[in-house]
Image (cartoon, helix red, strand yellow):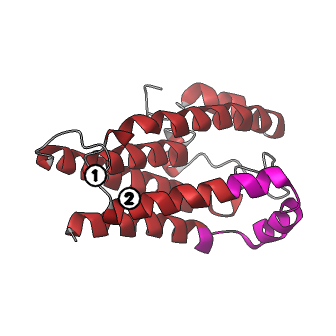
Amino acid sequence: MDPYRVILAAGLLGHKVVWEVLRPRAAEQRASALARSLTVVFIKAVKLCVLGFLVIQTLFLEIMPITNDPSSLRVIGMGLFGAGLGIAVLGRIQLGDNWVDLEEYQVVPGQALVTKGLYEYIRHPIYAGDILLLVGLQLALNSWLVLAAIIPAIVAFRNVQAEERILIRAFPEYAEYCRRTRRFVPFVF
């Protein structure tokens, strides 16, 4: 097995481990209450299936190759994957106990607005990092599935719009924060 595939798979699994280790205890209690919702169960199952597919693809599958000589794509992809992984994990760490499962769509008691670190420049580094990670993964794997990254990008954009409506209502200072930051790319978008 190629070492780059092992590194990519370890990154995917490490990403998941970070989220589970940093899960606030209150989230576990909220999750058990939410577990009754079929929609939440479905979303979590889809996310787990996608992760499983990506790990299997990363370790074993060659799907729709882009080129016969993927060396340059592999280097670019590994760089994007590493940057995306770093941004997403750092964003998650900086959120700390203020992180809420995207399925919850709510502000919980004690939650605070985070505006330091990566959040000083972009409002949604986890989404931005995850999209970058997925694009980088598929480029490193030399797969036309890179085009499928548009699907999570659309989902992320939809989620961001819903989250921002909630945050504007919950935190009066959020509107000013939005004026001085960008959603995904510092100083751009």
User: Any magenta on residue 27?
Assistant: yes
Does the CB distance between marks 1 and 2 fall below 8 Å?
A: yes
103 left or right of 49 in image: right
Question: Residue 3 at x, y = what percent?
Answer: 21, 69
Residue 173 visible, this orientation: no
CA separation in Å, label 1 and label 2: 9 Å
Please report the residue visible at 37 percent of the width from the left and 66 percent of the height from the top: 9
99 left or right of 165 in image: left
171 left or right of 134 in image: right
In the picture shown, does residue 99 fall above or below 149? below
Name the residue carrying label 2.
57
Name the residue carrying label 1.
141
Q: Quadrant of residue 110?
A: bottom right
Question: Residue 113 at x, y = what percent?
Answer: 69, 47
Residue closest to the eye, 171 or 131: 131
Tell me the amino acid under the disc marked 1.
Leu
In the picture shown, does residue 174 fall above or below 62? above
Tell me the amino acid under the disc marked 2.
Gln
Please report the residue visible at 28 percent of the width from the left and 51 percent of the height from the top: 141
In the picture shown, does residue 79 fall above or below 22? above
Mark closer to the chain start, 1 or 2: 2
As helix, strand or loop, the secondary structure at mark 2 comes to helix
Q: Which residues are magenta?
A: 20-44
Please report the residue visible at 32 percent of the width from the left and 55 percent of the height from the top: 82
